[in-house]
Amino acid sequence: MIGEISIFPDSHEVLVNEKVSISFTLKEYDVVYTLATNPNKIFSRNDLLEKVWGYDFEGDARTVDQHIKNIREKFKKAGIEFPIPKEEGLE
């Protein structure tokens, strides 16, 4: 449990205040899990691409920005702000 957020790796479930479930895509969940389990690390876009999408990902690096935006919106709808440290230029 991280503050008001509980993360269950086996079921890929994220709960807010132990009652509000947030539905994430698999990649969104992987980003949330990566950030939550490394709270003192600031990840660059490339760090997240390598860790979540893999070294052979050939898409646009801005996909990370879109996933972060979606994650923030979903947490906001659940009534909580998920603190995502920003690398300069990362939305």
Image (spheres, rainbow, N blue to C red):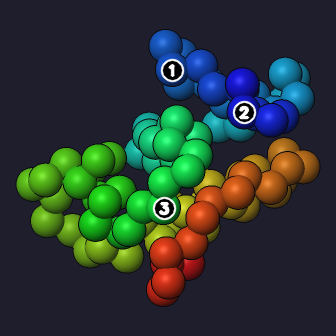
Residue type at mark 1 is: Pro
- 21 up-or-down from 41: above or below: above
Determine whether, in the image, residue 43 is placed left or right of residue 33. Answer: left
Spatial CA span between label 1 and label 2: 13 Å
- The single residue placed furthest to the top in the displayed view is 10
Question: Label 2 crowding class (10 Å Cα cut-off): few <14, some 14-19, many 20+?
Answer: few
Q: At x 58% / y 41%, what residue is drawn?
A: 36
Spatial CA span between label 1 and label 3: 21 Å
Disc 3 secondary structure class? loop
**Residue 9 - label:** 1
* Camera-nearest residue between 54 and 78: 54
Residue type at mark 2 is: Ile
Determine whether, in the image, residue 10 is placed left or right of residue 39. Answer: left
**Residue 42 - label:** 3
Can you tell which quarter of the image residue 5 is in? top right
Residue 82 place in picture, x, y as percent: 72, 52
Disc 1 secondary structure class? loop
Position of the N terminus by quadrant? top right
- 6 up-or-down from 55: above or below: above
Residue type at mark 3 is: Ile
Position of the C terminus by quadrant? bottom right
Q: Which residue is disc 2 drawn over?
A: 2
